[in-house]
Image: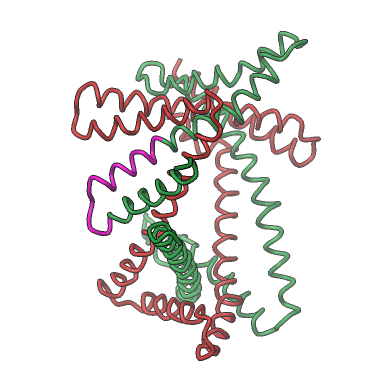
Chain colours: A green, B red
């Protein structure tokens, strides 16, 4: 039996072990899941090492003809990583906040710029452009977008004489948010249908693979 | 000391954030790229530390013979085999593990999701009857029937196409706008120092 054939049979066995969950939680399912977790952890370690850590070290700390400043810069992730590991210590845990602060600062900036240039501007352009195609559909899309946004508006009204906000929306906002809720339900339903069809396709492909291997087809 | 560290953390977040935004929008992007590489290398180190922690936890379970230690042993063997094959340069064996364990198990788990989704849809109507639940199921049925490649369901296919291109498109854009605006609001809160949860 060749290595490829062993691999194909192993795939079938693992598929059946996972599908055994349909009969309830059992030893075979758990065994497959733990093997999967082990292999996944191994691959995650390899990818982190191969595509991020080693290239970083090769271009900074281990690179020839580099000055002290560049090498010190190369050690910065190690220092930040060590600081993050200190988070598990009750005594020195606060030092880990410094590394976390750096990552949050970079992450926040990248997310904000990315969201403006990658989501807000293109979406606004697409929504505005669609008005020229089909007027009725464009109006529905416009109403849907506005109503969906208003559904997520959780602003409480302060009533005179009351210290705390009531948490009640105005009547107009209530009506619009019901429309928005309808659009959200339709969207989530479409996503659900997509997930159902995708999982059904994958399930039938797996079943077909198992049958083909067993029957030798 | 505690207060000084908290102030320092805020200064780092606000300073690094503002410099990165400036460099990404107005500057040449070199400094932002350096910051990003630094953050990516740190996160990669943390991922490696996480995997090592997983190994330590399961070694502990085996040594103390805790319930399920056999599973921990299996996990360790598979993890060490994966890394060992890679270190030994056995590309065929590494690919075999990927194609015969990783891909089939992931596919089978995705296939199992089908049963969970069908059961979830059944429970949605069985538990509580609301107009939103009813609308959800009606749209779901229209979209599923419309996906059938049969001539008899051509009208359902037309309705499906309209639903996908108009109301679903509107809802999806609204949700995406909401996420984008919420991201900006949260980002601004972090950058003006109003959100300081990272200092806790």
Report the residue at 41% width, 21% height from top: A93
Q: In this view, does A204 lie above or below B156?
A: above
Please indicate, yes or no, whether residue A193 appears anywhere in the rendered image. Answer: yes
- Highlighted magenta segment, given as a residue range: A21-38
Q: Is residue B43 above or below residue B175?
A: above
Q: In this view, does B139 lie to the left or right of B188?
A: left
Q: Which of B98 and A61 is in front in this view?
A: B98
Report the residue at 76% width, 35% height from top: B29
Report the residue at 27% width, 35% height from top: B71
Q: In this view, does A38 lie to the left or right of B123?
A: right
How many numbered discs?
A: 0
Residue B72's spot in the image, x, y percent? Answer: 29, 31
Q: Is residue B91 left or right of residue A119?
A: left
Residue A208's spot in the image, x, y percent? Answer: 43, 63
Q: Which residue lies furthest to the top in this view?
A: A68
Q: Which residue lies furthest to the front in this view?
A: A1
Please indicate, yes or no, whether residue A156 appears anywhere in the rendered image. Answer: no
Magenta span includes A33: yes
Magenta region, mostly helix, strand or loop? helix
Q: Nearer the viewer, residue A30 or B160?
A: A30
Q: Which of A142 and A45 is in front in this view?
A: A45
Q: In this view, does B99 lie to the left or right of A132?
A: left
Residue B116's spot in the image, x, y percent? Answer: 33, 62
Residue B10, located in which quarter of the rendered image? top right
Quarter holding the C terminus of chain B is top left
Q: Which of A111 and B34 is in front in this view?
A: B34
Report the residue at 51% width, 35% height from top: B94
Magenta span includes B31: no
Residue A157's spot in the image, x, y percent? Answer: 44, 62
Residue A19, located in which quarter of the rendered image? bottom left
């Amino acid at each position: 039996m060749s290595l490829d054939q062993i691999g194909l049979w192993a795939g079938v066995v693992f598929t059946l072990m996972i599908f055994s969950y349909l009969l309830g939680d059992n030893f075979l399912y758990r065994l497959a899941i733990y093997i999967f977790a082990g292999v996944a952890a191994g691959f995650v370690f390899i990818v982190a090492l191969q595509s991020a850590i080693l290239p970083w070290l090769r271009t900074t700390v281990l690179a020839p003809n580099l000055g002290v400043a560049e090498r010190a810069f190369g050690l910065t992730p190690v220092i930040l990583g060590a600081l993050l590991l200190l988070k598990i210590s009750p005594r020195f845990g606060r030092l880990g906040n410094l590394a976390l602060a750096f990552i949050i600062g970079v992450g926040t900036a990248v997310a904000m710029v990315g969201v403006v240039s990658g989501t807000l501007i293109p979406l606004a352009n697409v929504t505005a452009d669609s008005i020229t195609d089909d007027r009725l559909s464009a109006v529905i899309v416009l109403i849907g977008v506005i109503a969906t946004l208003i559904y997520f508006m959780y602003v409480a009204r302060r009533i005179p004489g009351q210290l705390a906000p009531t948490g009640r929306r105005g009547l107009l906002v209530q009506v619009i948010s019901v429309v928005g809720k309808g659009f959200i339900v339709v969207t989530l339903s479409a996503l659900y249908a997509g997930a159902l069809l995708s999982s059904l396709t994958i399930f039938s492909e797996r079943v077909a693979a198992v049958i083909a291997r067993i029957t030798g087809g | 000391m505690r207060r000084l560290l908290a102030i320092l953390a805020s200064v780092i977040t606000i300073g690094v954030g503002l410099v990165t935004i400036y460099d990404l929008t107005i500057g040449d992007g070199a400094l932002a790229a350096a910051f990003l590489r630094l953050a990516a290398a740190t996160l990669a180190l943390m991922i490696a530390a996480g995997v090592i922690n997983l190994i330590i936890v399961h070694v502990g379970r085996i040594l103390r013979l805790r319930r399920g230690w056999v599973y921990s042993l299996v996990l360790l063997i598979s993890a060490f085999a994966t890394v060992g094959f890679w270190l030994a340069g056995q590309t065929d064996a590494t690919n075999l593990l990927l194609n015969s364990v990783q891909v089939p198990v992931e596919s089978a788990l995705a296939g199992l999701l089908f049963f969970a989704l069908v059961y979830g849809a059944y429970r949605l109507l069985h538990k509580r009857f609301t107009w939103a639940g009813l609308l959800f199921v009606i749209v779901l049925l229209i979209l599923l029937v419309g996906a059938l490649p049969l001539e008899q369901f051509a009208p359902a296919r037309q309705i499906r196409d309209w639903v996908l291109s108009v109301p679903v498109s509107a809802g999806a854009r609204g949700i995406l706008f909401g996420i984008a605006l919420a991201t900006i609001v949260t980002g601004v809160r972090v950058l003006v120092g109003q959100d300081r949860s990272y200092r806790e």
